Image: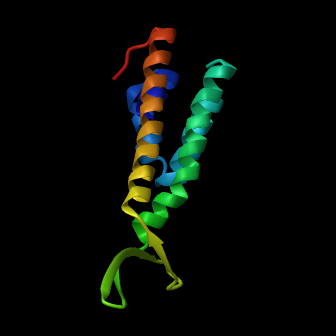
């Protein structure tokens, strides 16, 4: 996000401050970044491409919070002579839900793809708009 903000604002210090210091984190950071993109002189297509990625990140954010803030425990159950184990998330309300490592890995991969797309867009826009990258 700093690379894209730098291309838009043409000021590395301002880009860094907007992304890291002027917003608490999470969805607020994404909203602030969207405002920078929305008020930029980028083309409508360029703004839409960036905002599609930030919208996807916003949709992934609740899953991130669920993973990070819900304790994950290894639960055991006995079925006949077998002992089974499973990963379980416990919500603030005490509700338990099964979770798999593949679900967590998929989420990390989805976020990684979004970050990769933002990096790709920053490189493309930097080349198109004749500005240096970080």
Say how many tags the image has: 0
Q: Quadrant of the N terminus?
A: top left
- In this image, 127 relative to 75: left or right? right
Residue 52 shows in this picture: yes
Foreground pick, 115 / 130: 115
Foreground pick, 82 / 7: 82
- In this image, 51 relative to 21: left or right? right
Q: Quadrant of the C terminus?
A: top left
Residue located at (58% from left, 51% from top): 59
Percent x, y of residue 33: 54, 39
Foreground pick, 35 / 52: 52
Here the colouring is rainbow
Percent x, y of residue 35: 62, 37
Residue located at (44% from left, 68% from top): 99
Residue located at (54% from left, 59% from top): 62
Residue 40 shows in this picture: no
Percent x, y of residue 74: 32, 78
Q: Quadrant of residue 76?
A: bottom left
Percent x, y of residue 67: 43, 64
Q: Residue furthest right?
A: 44
Above or below, comparing residue 65 to residue 85 in the picture = above
Q: Quadrant of residue 49?
A: top right
Above or below, comparing residue 87 to residue 11 in the picture = below
Above or below, comparing residue 121 to residue 64 in the picture = above
């Amino acid at each position: 996000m700093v690379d894209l903000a730098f291309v838009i604002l043409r000021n590395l210090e301002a880009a860094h401050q907007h992304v890291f210091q002027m917003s608490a984190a999470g969805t607020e950071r994404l909203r602030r970044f969207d405002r920078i993109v929305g008020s930029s002189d980028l083309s409508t297509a360029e703004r839409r491409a960036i905002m599609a990625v930030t919208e996807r990140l916003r949709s992934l954010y609740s899953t991130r919070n669920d993973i990070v803030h819900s304790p994950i425990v290894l639960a055991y159950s006995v079925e006949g002579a077998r002992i089974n184990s499973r990963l379980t998330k416990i919500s603030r309300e005490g509700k338990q839900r099964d979770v798999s490592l593949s679900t967590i890995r998929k989420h990390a991969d989805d976020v990684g793809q979004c970050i990769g797309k933002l990096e790709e867009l920053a490189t493309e826009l930097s080349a198109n708009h004749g500005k240096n990258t970080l």
